[in-house]
Amino acid sequence: MCGIAGFIVAEPGRLDPRSVVEPMEMRLTHRGPDDRGFFASNPGRCALAHTRLSILDLSPAGHQPMSTPDGRYWIVFNGEIYNYRQLRRELELAGETFASQTDTEVILRLYARHGAGCLDRLRGMFGFSIWDNQRQQLVLARDPFGIKPIYYHVAKNSFAFASEVRALLASRMLPGKLSLDGLVSYLQFGSVQDPLTIVDGMRSLLPGHYLVVEREEDALRVKEVSYANRLNPVPLISDRREAVAVLRQILEESVRLHLISDVPLGAFLSGGIDSSALVALMSRVADEKPKTFSVVFAENGFSEAMPARLVAKTFGTEHREILLSEENLLRLLPSALEAMDQPTMDGINTYVIAKAVKEAGITVALSGLGGDELFAGYPSFRRMWQLRKMALLPQPLRRSASAFGRALSNGSVRRRKFWDLVESDCSPSAVYSISRELFAPAEIHALLRQKSHRSVRRGCDGKTDIINEISTHELRGYMANTLLRDTDQMSMAHALEVRVPFVDPRVVLNVLGLPGAWKMDSRRPKPLLLDAVGDLLPEEVWRRRKMGFTLPFERWLGSGLKAELDRDLLGKDVLIGPVLSSDYVRSVWDAFKRNPRQVPWSRPWALYVLNRWCSANNVAF
């Protein structure tokens, strides 16, 4: 995994691209500590920079920026292309010769032949930019599910991009000003939703899109194109038994491809169904026993040490546990917060395990991320299933019942959300939005000192398969904007590459093409996944209650972290004070301290993280 950055100006001589790109390159060193490279075009219109984490072909032949032999095309690439060997063989049959063993060179040669049409053939995670020296044109592209990030800033005469928000800020091409729309998005979901960012004037390239930047008279023209309908499912298989057999084959193939590496490789093992299934599949297709890693806690209600040990023993993995105590968290907290490229209410858990895995000598780790989204593992799926009949009741009746129920909620956020669901149109969109909500629209309105024109929507859906519709929302929303982004920023803080075999185009499109009803069962969790790989797993793994990979923040915020939040949320030097109502912020924190069972810990924690991030990155309103 790597860091990329670049800059283009409409008129050479107005601004030296090197002076803009070099600070961004320095800010991305943690993403690629093995090598650095720089390219400047003639006559000085474009500059590209790259920091390399060597995964494939560790030799100098993998150096970037990389060019075609004729010097026309130059690429900077962040990611992995898992079908690059097959693509390379096809190119060689067509007469291409290669100077390296990298997937980077394969992308470059494909683009030289097919232009942006090559994107449909890439199976992997990627964010890359290609400069065409002949046409004086820059292209940026991002993978279909948003596993790898790209951020950009557009001005009349210039365009800048980078793998991280903070790197783009280091270019000094835009002021460090808080985006009001980005802030509203953060308050609604606990992370900013693409294409917004927390910084005004900065955008995130949407998954499955590419940008074309070229000169038009004395300015730059930027065109964004969707190259793939990333959630367009393959035709479904009507026979469940056949579908399960095909799914098993596709999962094994995906894991096999994700194991391609020239450096040491391991896996995150939480002890849940997804990570356990991943380790089981690795054991079937890998040439050697997997190395597995788990975060465990002294608090038994949060620790999944026992099932993780059982899975490790079953498959004979080389297993390591990372004990995280409240004291250890307080010690790691400053560096974990510093690793956040954008504020997020989540991600500390990933920082902790990524740190331990890298310190164990591992450079690539596989994760079971994506399993809950695809195989109906979240509460939103059960809520949608339960609300099917509720939608048949007249709206006025539901509205009256909701008003009465909310009056009796006694400050409970969970109960308020339930009544919000009752009053909603009971669509998958509404169920997803309300289930994932950090603050409700009325609460966001009360929090903000300056009101945003951005509407907080709880929309409607037109599709009929409600379970697959929830999957689509979870994949595009929570997974893309929270889980994948957190995984990228927290793992790259330690120069660790994390791969997600469940978030593979063939896997995703196959599973979304199957009836949603196959993924729900009152007797078993994730029945479709269990039918495909359950024969490999100990029964104890899937029969126990789902826990999820979360830290005991509810308890820790009431003890060791309490003074930290008191100081940051209630002190005189609170940076978000001019933006958010200090009285409402205090009420959120006080409500949690009075009754943490009714007010989620994520609310005060998200406000604390926002304040710390703005302060650390000199971003103000």
Image: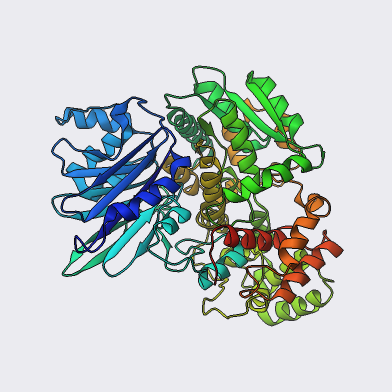
- Which quadrant is home to the N terminus? top left
Residue 526 shows up from this direction: no
- Which quadrant is home to the C terminus? bottom right
Q: How is the image coloured?
A: rainbow
Q: Nearer the viewer, residue 26 or 283?
A: 26
234 lies left or right of 120: right
In this rendering, is residue 496 above or below 176? above
Residue 204 position, x and y percent, is 43, 59
In this rendering, is residue 305 above or below 47? above
Question: To which quarter of the image does residue 217 belong?
Answer: bottom left
Identify the residue at image location x=62%, y=20%: 317
380 lies left or right of 204: right
Residue 174 shows up from this direction: yes
Residue 610 position, x and y percent, is 62, 62
Q: Nearer the viewer, residue 197 or 144?
A: 197
Identify the residue at image location x=54%, y=51%: 479
Residue 131 position, x and y percent, is 23, 49
Question: To which quarter of the image does residue 19 belong?
Answer: bottom left
